Amino acid sequence: MAQQEFTDAIALLKADHREVEELFEKFENATGKDRKQALAEKICTELKIHTQIEEEIFYPALRGKIEDDLLDEGIVEHDGAKVLINDIMAGGTGDDFYDAKVHVLSEGIEHHVKEEEAPSEGMFSQARDADVDLVALRDEMLARKQELAAQAESGGLPPAEATAVDPQAS
């Protein structure tokens, strides 16, 4: 992972958003099964890391300082993504619905990003107005992100764990 400078936690998270959007676009334009699988796995790894640093560090720091409904919806949206991430990671390009799952994951992430980044009422906008040290959060999140990236490189990350949604419910 290339070392980048981020002004604060929000800049770090937005950079993650742009990176994953670019990976989804590459997936949509890819033709070979091996290339598609490699991109899907990269997308899933990046999203696992991103959701984990948000849920472990960013969201708890904002709890009680911004609208709780935004945080709750963010967690539930993450859980929906995690179900697809685990399914995609367990499968392969030859599986039924593989491309469709990646596409639906992309749509869900696009929706989630729009809500987080919405001007004035979005989570990031509210976080900027809250009494939160976004630079200290950036440092904590970046350190955790680097730990998780190293873990992904060395042996892989475990399946993503849902927080609010029961993936076994039917």
Image: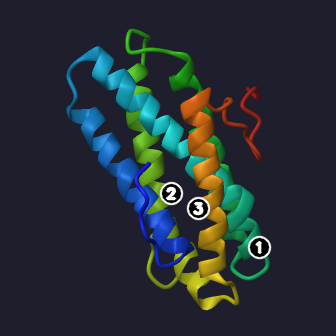
Residue type at mark 2: give it.
His
Quarter of the image holding residue 92? Answer: top left
Q: Nearer the viewer, residue 34 or 130?
A: 34
Res. 122 in view: no
> In this rendering, is residue 50 above or below 99?
below
Q: Where residue 39 appears, x then y in whole percent?
A: 36, 31
Is disc 1 placed on a helix, strand or loop?
A: loop
Label 2 or label 1, whichever comes before in sequence order? 1
* The label number, if any, that marks residue 112 in the structure image: 2
3 or 1: tag closer to the N-terminus: 1
74 relative position to 26: left or right? right
- Give the CA separation, mark 2 to mark 3: 21 Å
Amino acid type at circle 3 is: Leu
Query: Quick check: 57 left or right of 128?
Result: right
Mark 2 vs mark 1: give the one in front.
1
Q: CA distance from mark 2 to mark 1?
A: 18 Å
State yes or no: discs 2 and 3 in contact (Cβ < 8 Å). Answer: no
**Do residues under tags 3 and 1 come within 8 Å of each other at their CB atoms?**
no
Please state which amino acid type lies under the numbered disc 1.
Answer: Arg
Q: What mark, if any, has residue 46 been given in the picture?
A: none
| Secondary structure of residue under mark 2 | helix
Q: Is residue 11 visible?
A: yes
x then y, percent, for residue 34: 31, 16
Residue that mark 3 sits on: 142
For marks 2 and 3, the one nearer the N-term is 2
Q: Nearer the viewer, mark 2 or mark 3?
A: 3
Work out how far the residue at label 3 is from the one at label 1, CA to CA, in angstroms: 20 Å
Residue at image point 70% right, 57% down: 55
Q: Which residue is mark 1?
A: 63
